Image: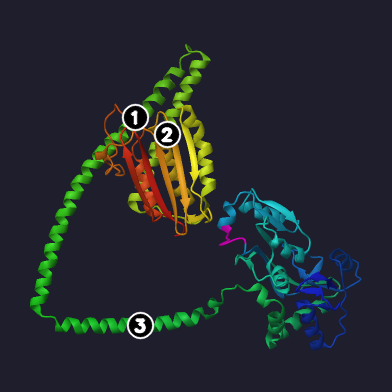
Amino acid sequence: MLGNNYPPYNFINEEDKLVGFNIDILKALDELYHYDIQISTGEWTYINQALKNNNIQAIAGTHYPGNLDNNYIYTRSIVNSFHCFLYNSNYVNRFSLERFRSLREPLVALWENDVLIHYVQSINPSAKFIFIDDYEQLTTMLDNKEVTCVFAQRVPVMYYANRLGKDYVRALDHQILERNMGFKVAKGYPELAEMLDNGLEVILANGEYQRIYDKWIYKYSESDNNWQNYYKHFLFTGFIVIIILLFLLIANRVLKSRIKSKTKDLQQQLDLNSEIMKELAEQKDKAEESDKMKSSFLANMSHEIRTPMNGILGFTELLRTPNYSSDEQKHFIEIIEQSGNRMLVTINNIIDVSKLQSGAEKPRFTAVNVYDILNQLQVFFTREANAKGIDLIVDEIESSYSEIIFTDEYKLNSILTNLIKNAIKFTDNGYIKVTYSIDKDWAEFWISDTGIGIAHDKQVSVFNQFEQAEVSNSRSYEGSGLGLSITKGYVELLKGEISLESEPLKGTTFYVRIPKSK
């Protein structure tokens, strides 16, 4: 016996006939041995009970259990099934596990099964589910815009997608929860199990199995990347072309070297030496200037770390004495917490600058919703702005383009956070306004404030890492002065641009432009 609703493995077709991959395998085995193999079908629970009661001798198309089962005999595997994520390409572009992991409460359609649910939640704990117990319904669920994706066996879903003309259904190549399928034989019929194993060996060897597999399974289980079929041919052809090009280049160099005169070679060497000396002199000047700036930077970092550390140690010592009230002790703890946070920010900035200088920081591009980021930042900074009596405004320049861009979400968030935080820090009255616009190729941001502004002679060097770090202990505002240099570094990593316009005592506007895609 076998199931009647598991296409394309075994199912009842429109002509009320039992057809499918497993049916053709049984027919091939029947023709091979000329046994009278009786085939019947029914619901899965009934089939398993019939085998348990010895009413039938075997089940075809059963998935093997993950643990040892001595109650039955299992033949060799005849096919492998697996689960994957499937999605509607009309609604979702560039769907991937990484994008699914970053979504907020995605809606997933699947069978109600604890293993499937736990696997999806291991990728995105916020996932919501809609349970379907039919593969055709699972496939049609992808027409619902509210459904992010389907998590199910790939072959049955792609079968229905093909049958229903839904060529926009796509499947990820990740093969998850792989399981083997074959024959499950009652313990008292070892001869039947041996016959099935031997028959499978024969049809695998004579090509009949491959014909059946290609007819029912192949086009639903294989990746759409047909170019992979020709990968070896392209690789071999490319290798031959590279060898030929290398040979031509070597021959060309040899010919050129023979016709060069000694006088020309000597002149080139003299010119090269002159350029090297000039470059060494420039590098020396840069090294000396860099050394001065690093000394200033280290002095400032020493101050930035010592100041909160002194606060932490001083007020910790005060907490040792019982002479203070609970309110005073609470105040001391708040000061210790503020000092610790200030020192943590300073250390994080130093780490970020080091990563940027060493080239270790790399962008990680994902789909990013600009509106969501700015909405979260407005909620986060509104309380701080209101505490200073200033307004925080976020305004969008109307556009017909989507607010989804392809960039590094963490770095974009850091850029906007640093600029908004700076604006609040240096503005005592008025407002902070964040304006953004998205066109065909770029996402643009303007962060304006009515603060103290930036002196004209400082605007050129405001993004420099070391020139920003003042040594004076009498500054009016806390901070290491590294925020803008980190911001510029992140903008450049994203292939963008940053500039500013400012008038002292009137305010400042920072302009950032980054591409919509990498």
Q: CA distance from mark 2 to mark 1?
A: 25 Å
Please tell me which residue lies in front, 207 or 468: 468
Name the residue type under label 1: Arg
Secondary structure under badge 3?
helix
Res. 243 mark: 3
Residue at the location (11% across, 67% down)?
A: 271
| Mark 2: amino acid | Ile
Find out whether the residues at labels 2 and 1 contact each other: C-beta distance under 8 Å. no
Main SS, magenta region, reads loop
Q: CA distance from mark 3 to mark 2?
A: 61 Å
x and y percentages locating residue 307 in the rendered image: 35, 28
Of marks 2 and 1, the one in the foreground: 2
Image position of 33 with respect to 335: above or below: below
Q: Residue furthest left?
A: 263
Q: Which residues are magenta?
A: 91-97
Residue receiving disc 1: 306
Q: Which mark is residue 424?
A: 2
State which tag comes first along the sequence, 2 or 1.
Answer: 1
